[in-house]
Image (spheres, helix red, strand yellow):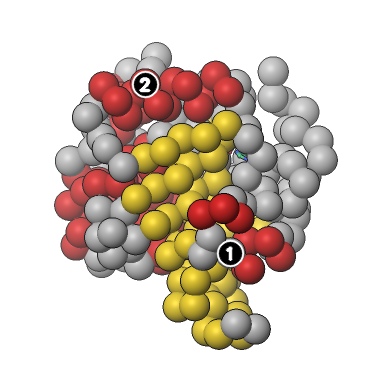
Amino acid sequence: MVTQQLERRGIRDQRVLQVMATTPRELFVPGVPTSLAYDDRALPIDAGQTISQPYMVARMTELLQVEPGDRILEIGTGSGYQAAVLARLGAKVTSIERLPDLAEAARERLRELGIEGVDVRVGDGSTGEPEGAPWDGIVVTAGAPSIPDALREQLAVGARLVIPVGPRYQQDLVVVERHGPADWREWSDGAVIFVPLVGEGGWSEPDPREP
Ligand code: SAH
């Protein structure tokens, strides 16, 4: 997975490659045969949601430029895989999930794997987590119609927000970097497809395919 998919597609951060090589993705996709768990694609988890393809997790993590001890906010815990990768890079992760069953399963999985430093919370993360702000990085792993202002405001100066933005079934992976109290720069890292971010700062309706 690391050589064929991540390095070949341009992931250069050695720490990210190392952590992904040693985090067992198969344990985050119960019911999926081990032979498929490392394929270069998104896979279904419960409740109509998906775990992103390995390249996307690697790219989003690389773009966040995580340093040990950083406080990172993830929105969309899903399986807990992205959170696990961030925690294993030394980040202190707060991860918010809208669906309680997914949050509980992710918590349990992280506990079983002995991965510490992830606080999974249930709720609408589309407007961030103001109590914990400013964050050293914010990663949204669901697609938003636009960039919620609340998320920009909760970035520390020098920190980045990585968020898929655009219509429901096709987004741009947008990076927002805060340069000062009222100075943000943003650019797109390319086209992506994520399940919708549902909530106050996202879409008002879930994906019609969601059970
Ligand atoms: N990062 C995950 C993949 C996430 S899939 C992983 O590594 O497996 C996107 C997740 O975002 C879904 O679980 C969905 O329920 C959740 N989600 C959607 N809108 C949300 C919101 N407003 N707040 C928190 N979680 C949300």
Q: Which residue is mark 1?
A: 154
Could you give the CA–CA distance between mark 1 and mark 2, rounded to whole angstroms?
Answer: 28 Å
Residue at x 52%, y 24% (from the top left corner): 102
- Quarter of image, ligand 1: top right
- Say whether residue 65 is left or right of residue 104: left
Graded by Cα atoms within 10 Å as few (under 14), some (14 to 19) or many (20 or more), the crowding at tag 1 reads: many
| Res 18 seen here | yes
Where residue 19 appears, as percent x and y from the top left, is 21, 48
Residue at x 52%, y 35% (from the top left corner): 121
Farthest front residue in view: 131
At label 2, the amino acid type is Glu
Quadrant hosting residue 172: bottom right
With respect to residue 100, does 158 lie above or below? Answer: below
- Say whether residue 150 is left or right of residue 40: right
Kind of element beneath mark 1: loop
User: In front here: 190 or 89?
Assistant: 89
User: Is the N terminus in the top left, top right, bottom left or bottom right quadrant?
Assistant: top left
Residue at x 57%, y 58% (from the top left corner): 163
Question: Is the CB atom of the residue marked by disc 2 within 8 angstroms of ligand 1's nearest atom?
Answer: no
Question: Nearer the viewer's eye, disc 1 or disc 2?
Answer: 1
Marked residue nearer the N-terminal end (1 or 2): 2
Kind of element beneath mark 2: helix
Farthest top residue in view: 31
Quadrant hosting residue 96: top right
Are discs 1 and 2 less than 8 Å apart at CB?
Answer: no
With respect to residue 64, does 105 lie above or below? Answer: above
